[in-house]
């Protein structure tokens, strides 16, 4: 019979327990309970602050709409952030399907809209900051208007968000909203007084990419060396998109003078300083390139357009190839640049595992975004709104409108408000020479209408063919300009130009002042003048800078011709 083991602990057991007790780092039960309690209290405080922020923001938005001061979306985000600076992070973490961030100089709005249309067709509930700005207050507003007073998103956050983000705040957005997908469209010179040269924005983007979690998929334009180089800095998954159609090479299309029609914003490699050499160049610095010094080359595109053709001014056809399929897709938008926007949307959708059918249907049934080819019927004429806010964007709009020698009716609006950039010297890099001899009627307007008229005169357009509608009374405009000139007297013509209105002064002395409308001023009169000069059943193309677009749209809203931008339907 074996002896039964005693339950009494031995000396060795006691020593082992004492040793374990001395080295054990586990918190006592009481400490764990205190920690849980503190965590619960912290969450409760956050929810309380978020609820107050939501109520304050939504109240501010409602008041803004009641007083007809706007859609109340950006002010909602601004107030909510002032109440609770962490409101964006608090709400975005509740999104069941995460977030997509889209940034870049050109194409952010259209790319975001295309992604939204695809995901909507795929069955997702899609939330965007379409109603507000692309700064953090606009992102905050988009979340706040979809939140409840308890600080939680409606419908338990069962949505995916697509946030269009300004180039300068991408790093802030990434820190606050770790995205599932981050899309960088392109990098061009834009608002020099705000952003600086492209190198400044590129440095900010490199920092933003360093903050991305490895779980993010990075979507980059392979044809833009300033954007494609970000892929070398990221350890997570990278997908590239681009065009592989030699027939679109602008040097082959336009011959030795091709570069005259282009504003080249990136010429050297950021890693070694060597110049880029191109085998294909589509526009500006976009194309197939290699560095002459370190021999870095354009990365292979995962999503590529191998054949692109126009189908009238309103449609593009592209043959798209990926590793597993080939598909022809019709893009219902004007402008070659929209091929890149569609490819970016396809790449982002594939990164999310979206199937073929919603990708095709989402793109082919897409409706133009506010001011990006939008069509409005006015007094028997069609208005087409085409935003152009920098030299490359303007050149591509002109390329779209005048690629076959067609005569066009134009209203050009140039403003120098803060959102446009105070420095409008970039208009001298726009290829207005392209449109000479192809203008049916031409009206120019905006705060810098005289500057634009002067540029057009130097392009070769006769002054009598330019109708100028200033933003204020002509007598007041003359007084301001002449007063500035008097203060700058003796400092030379260059100094006068640097004072901000030098080219307007030159315009007054260059015969253009005689073309200024005497029947009124401001955007409403400019619109009326351009419409009257456009025959019935024809199209007036309106090409404004950013705040000019807002003014035009506001005037169309006032006349009941288009809904308020925050009331527009769609994903």
Image: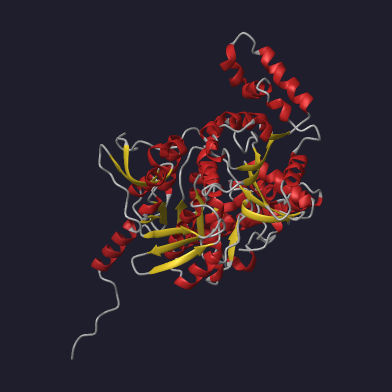
In the displayed structure, would residue 383 be above or below residue 356?
Answer: above
x and y, in percent, of residue 398 in the image: 55, 44
Determine the image quadrant of residue 533.
Answer: top right
Quadrant assignment for the C terminus: bottom right
Query: Considering only vertical position in the picture, is 325 above or below 37?
Result: below
Relative height, residue 541 to residue 502 (above, below):
below
Work out which residue is located at the far bottom of the displayed protein and give it. 1
Q: In percent of the image, x 65 and y 49: which residue is there?
A: 77
In front here: 47 or 317?
Answer: 317
Residue 500, given in percent of the width and then of the height, sits at 63, 24
* Residue drawn at 33 percent across, 38 percent down: 269
Front-most of residues 519 and 534: 534
Residue 278 in the image: x percent, y percent?
A: 33, 43
The image position of residue 401, as x and y in percent, is 56, 48
Q: Is residue 211 left or right of residue 458?
A: left
Q: Is residue 514 visible?
A: yes
């Amino acid at each position: 019979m074996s002896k039964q083991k005693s339950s009494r602990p031995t000396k060795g057991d006691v020593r082992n327990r004492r040793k374990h007790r001395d080295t054990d780092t586990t918190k006592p039960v009481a400490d764990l309970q205190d920690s849980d309690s503190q965590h619960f209290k912290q969450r409760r405080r956050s929810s309380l602050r978020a609820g107050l922020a939501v109520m304050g923001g939504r109240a501010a938005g409602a008041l803004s709409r009641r007083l007809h001061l706007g859609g109340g979306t950006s002010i909602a985000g601004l107030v909510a952030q002032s109440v609770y600076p962490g409101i964006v992070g608090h709400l975005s973490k509740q999104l069941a399907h995460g977030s997509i961030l889209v940034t870049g100089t050109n194409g952010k709005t259209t790319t975001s809209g295309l992604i939204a249309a695809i995901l909507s067709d795929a069955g997702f509930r899609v939330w965007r900051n379409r109603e507000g700005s692309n700064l953090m207050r606009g992102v905050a507003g988009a979340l706040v208007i979809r939140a409840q007073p308890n600080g939680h998103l409606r419908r338990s956050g069962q949505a995916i968000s697509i946030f269009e983000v300004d180039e300068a705040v991408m790093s802030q957005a990434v820190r606050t909203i770790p995205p599932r997908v981050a899309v960088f469209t392109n990098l061009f010179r834009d608002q020099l007084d705000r952003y600086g040269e492209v190198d400044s924005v590129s440095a900010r983007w490199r920092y933003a990419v360093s903050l991305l979690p490895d779980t993010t998929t990075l979507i980059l334009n392979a044809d833009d060396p300033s954007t494609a180089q970000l892929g070398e800095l990221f350890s997570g998954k990278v997908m590239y998109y681009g065009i592989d159609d030699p027939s679109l090479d602008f040097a082959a299309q336009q011959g030795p003078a091709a570069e005259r029609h282009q504003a080249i914003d990136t010429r050297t490699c950021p890693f070694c300083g060597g110049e880029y050499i191109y085998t294909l160049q589509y526009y500006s610095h976009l194309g197939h390139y290699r560095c002459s010094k370190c021999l870095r080359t354009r990365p292979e595109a995962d999503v590529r357009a191998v054949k692109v053709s126009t189908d009238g001014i309103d449609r593009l056809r592209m043959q798209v190839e990926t590793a597993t399929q080939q598909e022809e897709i019709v893009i219902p938008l004007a402008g070659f640049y929209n091929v890149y926007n569609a490819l970016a949307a396809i790449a982002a959708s594939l990164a999310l595992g979206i199937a073929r059918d919603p990708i095709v249907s989402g793109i082919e049934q897409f409706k133009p975004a506010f001011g990006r080819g939008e069509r409005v019927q006015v007094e028997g004429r069609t208005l087409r709104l085409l935003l152009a806010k920098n030299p490359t964007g303007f050149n591509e709009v002109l390329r779209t409108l005048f690629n076959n020698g067609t005569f066009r009716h134009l209203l050009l609006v140039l403003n120098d408000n803060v959102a446009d950039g105070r420095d409008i010297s970039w208009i001298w890099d726009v290829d207005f020479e392209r449109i000479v001899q192809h203008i049916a009627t031409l009206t120019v307007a905006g705060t810098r209408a005289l500057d634009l008229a002067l540029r057009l005169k130097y392009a070769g357009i006769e002054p009598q063919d330019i109708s100028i509608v200033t933003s204020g009374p002509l007598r007041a405009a003359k007084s301001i300009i002449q007063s500035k000139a008097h203060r700058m007297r003796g400092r030379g013509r260059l100094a006068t130009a640097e004072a901000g209105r030098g080219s307007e002064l030159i315009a007054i002395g260059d015969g253009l002042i005689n073309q200024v409308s005497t029947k009124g001023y401001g955007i409403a009169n400019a619109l009326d003048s351009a419409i009257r000069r456009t025959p019935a059943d024809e199209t007036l193309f309106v090409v404004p800078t950013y705040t000019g677009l807002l003014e035009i749209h506001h005037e169309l809203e006032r006349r009941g011709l288009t809904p308020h931008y925050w009331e527009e339907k769609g994903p």
